[in-house]
Image (cartoon, helix red, strand yellow):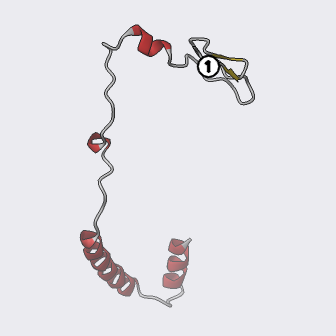
Amino acid sequence: MANIDLLKEILNNNLLASDELLRLRAKEVELGSELDMMTVSDFSVGKLDLPQISEDQPEEFFANVPSEVNEMGDETKRASDQFEDGDFDAED
C-alpha cells in the first residue's frame, strides 16, 4: 500500500523520485549500521544438551512409545496397553 501511495505522490508532482531515492538510501545506511550492532541469539539445536537415541536401543525402549495418536476425545491407549480406556493403572 505504501508503494501505491508513493507512486501517486510522484505522479502528482508532490514528490521528486530523486529526493525519495536519496532518502531511502540514507535510511538503508542507517538501518544497516543498526543491524550490525544488534546481537542475535544463536538458537542452534546442536548446542542443546539432548539425550541421544540410537538404533541400537533395546526393543523394550521402543515398545513404550505410542504407536499412534488418537483424535481429540478418544480414550488414551498406548502400544504396550499400559493405559487403556483412559484409566491409569499402576503396575506392581
* Secondary structure category for the residue under label 1: loop
Q: Residue at x 33, y 35 (%)?
A: 50
Residue 92 horizontal side relative to residue 16, left or right: right
Q: Which residue is mark 1?
A: 90
Answer above or below: position of 24 versus 16: above
Picture layout, residue 75 above or below residue 6: above
Residue positioned 30% across, 12% down in the render: 56
| Residue 73 drawn at (x, y percent) | 75, 29
Quarter where residue 5 is shown: bottom right
Count of numbered tags: 1
Image coords of residue 90 (percent x, y): 61, 19
Q: Is residue 42 left or right of residue 72?
A: left
Give the quadrant of the C terminus. Answer: top right
Q: Is residue 40 left or right of residue 60?
A: left
Compared across the picture, whether 75 is left or right of 50 comes to right
Whole-percent x, y for residue 48 in the image: 31, 42
Q: Relative to 37, does residue 9 appear above or below in the rendering? A: below
Seen from the viewer's position, the closer of residues 76 and 83 is 83
**Depth check, front residue: 30 or 50:** 50
The residue sitting at 65% across, 19% down in the picture is 89
Task: Tell me: residue 63, above or below residue 16.
Answer: above
| Residue at the extreme bottom | 14
Q: Quadrant of the N terminus?
A: bottom right
| Residue type, label 1 | Ala
